Amino acid sequence: MGKIKSLLIKTRFSTALRAHKCKANSKHLISKGDFRLEVKNDRNWDKYCRVCSSKIFKENNKNWNGKYDEFTTEYENLSL
Ligand SMILES: [Zn+2]
């Protein structure tokens, strides 16, 4: 098997070079040096604070597992 197709949006982690607001909630301030999650959005990177990043991962895990369950169920139904 060759290169496996990725189904994930590009993400990366970084520390803020300057203080700025969180993309998900403008009341969340990301201070200089804080950990942040960056999510590719066209040519830009949306940046999220640690609290929102954690929520994003938890929610995406749920959706991801649900999607995989859906896939296996569909596959099994078609293979009968
Ligand atoms: Zn946030």
Image (cartoon, rainbow, N blue to C red):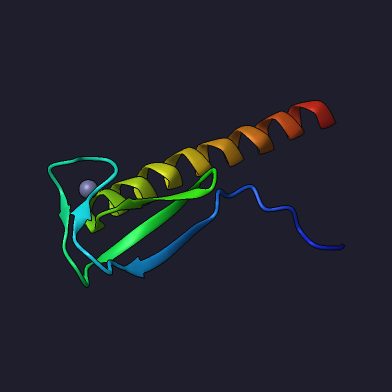
Query: Does 78 sit above or below residue 55?
Result: above
- Asked whether, in this view, residue 40 is left or right of residue 5, the answer is left
Residue that extends furthest to the right in the rendered view of this protein:
1
Residue 23 horizontal/vertical position (percent): 29, 44
Query: Does 80 sit above or below residue 48?
Result: above
- Asked whether, in this view, residue 57 is left or right of residue 67, the answer is left
Residue 20 horizontal/vertical position (percent): 21, 54
Residue 8 horizontal/vertical position (percent): 58, 50
Q: Is residue 12 visible?
A: yes
Residue visible at 67% across and 38% down in the picture: 72
Q: Nearer the viewer, residue 57 or 68?
A: 57
Q: Quadrant of residue 26?
A: top left
- Asked whether, in this view, residue 80 is left or right of residue 32, the answer is right
Query: Does 56 sit above or below residue 70?
Result: below
Residue 48 horizontal/vertical position (percent): 30, 52
The image shows a total of numbered marks equal to 0
Position of the N terminus, as image quadrant, is: bottom right
Residue visible at 19% across and 68% down in the picture: 32
Q: Nearer the viewer, residue 31 or 80?
A: 31
Q: Is residue 80 visible?
A: no
Q: Quadrant of residue 80?
A: top right
Q: Quadrant of residue 79?
A: top right
Residue visible at 76% across and 58% down in the picture: 4
Residue visible at 81% across and 27% down in the picture: 78
Q: Nearer the viewer, residue 23 or 3?
A: 23
